[in-house]
Image (cartoon, rainbow, N blue to C red):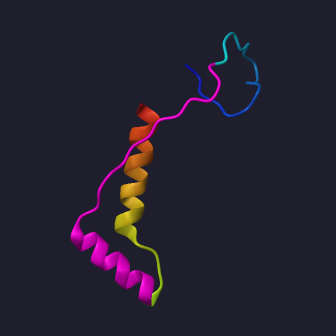
Amino acid sequence: MILTTTPTVQGRDITHCHGVVVGEAILGANIFKDIFASIRDIVGGRSAAYERELAKAREIAFEE
């Protein structure tokens, strides 16, 4: 199955459109990630721990 957000796929005929399809995933971070993310909010910068959790959630949602 080819997944796309465009109305056409070059070189392919679209035989069925499923409409909007979504997948959702919620992952909890632990207290240490929360503490370090709060420190990052104060001093500035990106929270790598939260970015990894978001990436993991996105992958799970795509699989669903």
Q: Is residue 22 magenta?
A: yes
Taking 48 as reference, is 43 above or below it? below
Q: Is residue 14 left or right of residue 53?
A: right
Residue 37 pos. (x, y %): 36, 76
Q: Answer with the quarter of the image where residue 15 lies.
A: top right
Residue projecting furthest to the top: 15
Q: Quadrant of the N terminus?
A: top right
In this orientation, which residue lies closer to the viewer: 48 or 36?
Answer: 36
Residue positioned 71% across, 14% down in the render: 14
In this orientation, which residue lies closer to the viewer: 57 or 48?
Answer: 57
Residue segment shown in magenta:
18-42
Q: Is residue 52 left or right of residue 8?
A: left
Q: Answer with the quarter of the image where residue 39 lies.
A: bottom left
Residue 64 pos. (x, y %): 42, 31
Residue positioned 39% across, 43% down in the render: 25
Residue 26 pos. (x, y %): 36, 48
Residue positioned 59% across, 27% down in the render: 3
